[in-house]
Image (cartoon, rainbow, N blue to C red):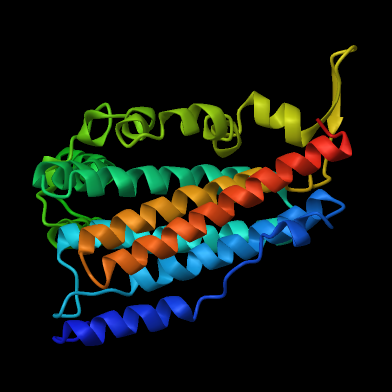
Amino acid sequence: MPSDDPNDNAGAFIAAFDSIRTTDVSASRTNTFTSEDDFNGLSVELLIEVGSFICVAANLLPHGGRWSRNEAVLGGHVVRLYKLISALLDQICQRRREITFIIGRLTFECIVNLRFLLKHADDPTVFHSYVAYSMRNERRLQDKIEERIAAREGKILPVETRMLNSIAKVANASGVCIEDASASRPKEWADKNIFERAEAVGLGESYLGAFRGPSASVHGNWMDLLEFQLDTHHDEGTFAPSFEWRNPRPQIAQTIAHLATEAVRDYFRHLGEGPLEFIDERFDELSSRILEAMKAHEAYLVRSGAL
């Protein structure tokens, strides 16, 4: 919990940040790399470093020790980002490229949503829209239960009582009336889809270039089956099952590390906690090292003839 003394807070920030291990991305190290596995290892180290900063951010609570609803929307995204990065690290280390695509896409959406919400932090209608949209399935379920009760001329089954009470409990904690959640599917919360939200925070090109494709892995469409789940004979148009996991590549982890760094920087700025100039310097340096790792990987691909 923050202290009432700003000097204590500044000291705590500096101590927390200084305890985070800095990843070595120097040319003297990366020039010795002989495989993409080496760069995967470097990406893991960078993601652990980024995740450590996110953990510091997620543990910043107001003086009362609890978040309000809108603060919880933001803080919950920071916690979710930490957990998704942890899951991404796990699947990289288990050498499962297919699952890294799924988690990477989910992580990107979390970053977009967090930055979009931070951009509109002073607009309570955006937060209300987010929460109400999130509860549309509860609204549909309540409507269906009430239809069945009406069809039985008011007789309520015990299981229905429990379900209705559960929905009411969630709505109360969320600060909304269940009637505010539209049962019919609206376009999206804040009236923007994921691409439009990404564009609004300057990440439209990142979505199209790096994360639109992994959406196929999330939903399991044909492109995911073709690339990861099938042994394809392209000339004959015949297929066989493929149970082998593909080795991950460094690009998704590197990109997530870079984007997550900027998202957590935005969160620190929003909170206004700690020595902001010191925080900016640390994140500038971290972003620079992540970009150096990306350049080193590209140089390796050219050097090894993999392009």
Give the vertical position of 56 relative to 86 (above or below).
below
Give the vertical position of 170 relative to 200 (above or below).
below
Quadrant in which the C terminus is drawn: top right
- Residue closer to the observer: 32 or 76: 32
Q: Could you tell me residue 306's position as x and y percent?
A: 84, 34
Q: Could you tell me residue 201's position as x and y percent?
A: 32, 37
Q: Could you tell me residue 119's position as x and y percent?
A: 22, 44
Answer with the quarter of the image where residue 244 lies. top right
On the question of residue 110 being in view, the answer is yes
- Residue closer to the observer: 97 or 293: 293
- Residue closer to the observer: 218 or 78: 78
Quadrant in which the N terminus is drawn: bottom left
For image coordinates 21% across by 64% down, the residue present is 271
Give the vertical position of 222 relative to 32 (above or below).
above
On the question of residue 141 being in view, the answer is no
For image coordinates 19% across by 69% down, the residue present is 67
* Left or right: 151 in relation to 89: left
Question: Disc count in the image?
Answer: 0
For image coordinates 58% across by 44% down, the residue present is 102
* Left or right: 39 in relation to 134: right
Answer with the quarter of the image where residue 186 lies. top left
Q: Could you tell me residue 235's position as x and y percent?
A: 89, 12
For image coordinates 16% across by 56% down, the residue present is 171
